[in-house]
Amino acid sequence: MDFLNKLSNVASETYKYTAEKTGKIAKEAKLKMKINENKSKIEDLYEEIGKIVYQKHVREEDINIKEDIQDYCSSIDKLSSEIEDYRMQILNLKERKQCKNCFSEIDIDVKYCPNCGYEQKDEPSSKIINEKQDDDKEEVKNEDKGNNNDNN
């Protein structure tokens, strides 16, 4: 019986590990898809800005950025900010961070960047990991609520 209990425990731990890794991969894929969607939207906005500028040029009108393309630029800023947030979420899923100096992707616990040697003086990795775990718990709660609503 002891052997079966050990086997059961190992199988259970393996399942938990696999489920966690699969969940991380799925989250990363969703985030990358959102990044690509935002990049596509930004390209569309660039195209619209170009059209406006060219039309003003053809008509030999003055281009007033504040009036003509401010909304487009604000939208691009918002989408770029979302992309950066998604990128940081992906780094957290991988338990990695970005060097403040050279922006290389590095292990979360390193004190100096292996690429440029810059000292990493940011918050302790345990705080980042705990925040990530809190985010994961909140997401599981939200998914459970969604599943309960689907069942009703």
Image: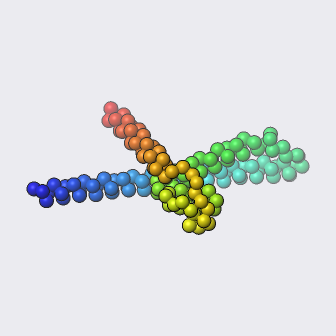
* Percent x, y of residue 95: 47, 56
57 to 67, vertically: above or below: below
Pick the residue in front: 137 or 30.
137
Residue 139 visible, this orientation: no
55 to 103, vertically: above or below: above
Q: Is residue 141 shown left or right of residue 54?
A: left
Residue 49 visible, this orientation: yes
Q: Is residue 54 shown left or right of residue 108?
A: right
Which color scheme did the rendering employ for the protein?
rainbow
| In the image, farthest residue toward the top | 152
Q: Is residue 53 shown left or right of residue 71?
A: right
* Percent x, y of residue 127: 48, 47
Residue at x 59%, y 67% (from the top left corner): 115
Pick the residue in front: 138 or 68.
138
Residue at x 62%, y 66% (from the top left corner): 116
* Percent x, y of residue 68: 79, 42
Pick the residue in front: 98 or 37.
98
Q: Quadrant of the N terminus?
A: bottom left
| In the image, farthest residue toward the left | 1
Count numbered badges in the picture. 0
Residue at x 57%, y 52% (from the top left corner): 122
Q: Quadrant of the C terminus?
A: top left
Q: Is residue 109 shown left or right of residue 56?
A: left
Residue at x 65%, y 51% (from the top left corner): 42
* Percent x, y of residue 87: 55, 53
